[in-house]
Amino acid sequence: MAETSEPVKAPAALKKGALVRVNREAYSQSIEAAASDSSPPDYIFQGPGEILTIKGEYGQVRWRMPVPDVWLRLDQLESC
């Protein structure tokens, strides 16, 4: 039988407008990290970034510097 996976829900603190940073351990073990640059920028781990919108299990994060917004899985983010 096929297993059904439940969608990831954002913790209460992770909603639109929340200030976040990337959890280094969760990100480094993800498929997104394997598909990206081998040395991610430090500012994503230091934060803060602001969640602009949430769609499904992903959040769009804007950093307080002149860089593009990024989509990251909510389980890779933590509150600042």
Image (spheres, rainbow, N blue to C red):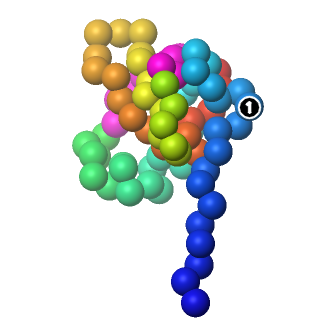
Q: Position of residue 24 (x, y in %)?
A: 52, 41
48 with respect to 44 (left or right): right
Camera-nearest residue between 29 and 63: 63
Secondary structure of the residue carrying tag 1 is loop
Camera-nearest residue between 44 and 57: 57
* Tag 1 residue: 12
Camera-nearest residue between 6 and 51: 6
Categorize mark 1 by other alpha carbons within 10 Å: few (<14), some (14-19), many (20+): few
For the point 29% across and 10% down, which residue is it?
66
Q: Quadrant of residue 31?
A: bottom left
Answer above or below: position of 13 versus 75.
above
For the point 43% across and 28% down, which residue is it?
60
Is residue 10 at least partly visible in the picture? yes
Q: Quadrant of residue 80?
A: top right
Q: Which residues are magenta?
A: 40-52
Q: Position of residue 48 (x, y in %)?
A: 53, 17
For the point 59% across and 72% down, which residue is it?
4
Q: Quadrant of residue 72?
A: top left
Answer above or below: position of 63 versus 25.
above
**62 part of magenta stretch:** no
Q: Position of residue 61 (x, y in %)?
A: 44, 24
For the point 36% across and 50% down, which residue is it?
32
